[in-house]
Amino acid sequence: WLCRGGIQLQEIFRGGERIAGGALDYKIDAENMNRALRGHAETLNNIGNGLSRAVEDRMQSERMKTELITNVSHDIKTPLTSIVNYVDLLGKEQIPGETAQEYLAVLERQSQRLKKLIEDLVEASKASTGNLQVDLQLTDVAELCRQTAGEYTDRLSARELELIAQLPEEAYIYADGRYLFRVLDNLLGNICKYAQKGTRVYLDLAFAGKNIVISLKNISRDRLNISPSELMERFVRGDSARSTEGSGLGLSIARSLTELQGGTFDIEIDGDLFKVQICFPAAPLI
């Protein structure tokens, strides 16, 4: 009786470890167990069922939200395109009155901002659901970082930001150059918007074992009163009271695009120091 009990107890332990490890469909065979142990085994089986239902409900909810965002974005995009076009046509007309010109400038600025938000919504939806065609090719990420940094030289200077880049001659990974550029573009764009004027921005690329790590660091202009995990959620920005430029989608898009290419995307916050680390497996060169 003791031997049978011990074997059955081991089966319950193993089953609990399997369920805890993510095998939610795993079932412990409790039919021939004694009454006390059978109750524990059935409880673990029920926990697995409950977790499976919860995960399925969460995934369905996420799919519905994503589909809703995509559909609404497409529905808004058509009339918005007409608004943008007519605002452009009005701008070419000689409308008398300084006040009317100011109103027209506001219309143009806000319509362009709304257009950018809709485009970011569609891209975020596609990236988070994996509905993007990724073409992984051998890419010199060091050269891509140099090119991206070069394109931001004027914008950073206009914001009184000094970029300090420490990049090797070459570093190869397998990535889609279009999407990797978009990741770097989003990050440097955020730095231009939210970094403290008169500070330095660091762009580093280093080898870490079999991986290549890209890191970007800057000092935030506003207090970062939020955790890194919350900051990567959609529509979230560092200061909840801020209503300036930006949609709060940049970091979410950057993370999704990085993960689609097989990389990892992490954020660290230390006081006003904002740091992003992107890690990719180094490409084996023969």
Image (tube, grey):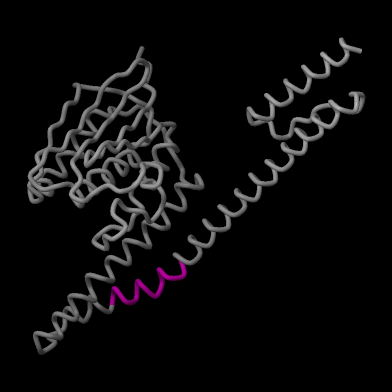
**Residue 247: quarter of image:** bottom left
**Residue 99: quarter of image:** bottom left
Q: How many marks?
A: 0
Residue at figure coordinates x 36%, y 12% from the top left: 286
**Residue 109: quarter of image:** bottom left
Depth check: 126 or 235 in front? 235
Residue at figure coordinates x 24%, y 76% from the top left: 107
Residue 177 image position (x, y, % from top left)? 33, 37
Please state the extent of the stretch shown in magenta in the rendering.
74-85
Q: Does the magenta stretch mainly form a helix, a strand or a loop?
A: helix
Q: Is residue 78 magenta?
A: yes
Q: In the drawing, does residue 115 fall left or right of residue 51?
A: left
Residue 71 image position (x, y, % from top left)? 51, 64
Q: In the drawing, does residue 184 fall left or right of residue 26?
A: left
Depth check: 222 or 117 in front? 222
Depth check: 64 or 138 in front? 64
Residue 162 image position (x, y, % from top left)? 9, 39
* Vertical placement of residue 171 versus 264, above or below: above
Residue 37 image position (x, y, % from top left)? 84, 25
Residue at figure coordinates x 16%, y 38% from the top left: 201
Q: Is residue 58 magenta?
A: no
* Vertical placement of residue 86 versus 8, above or below: below
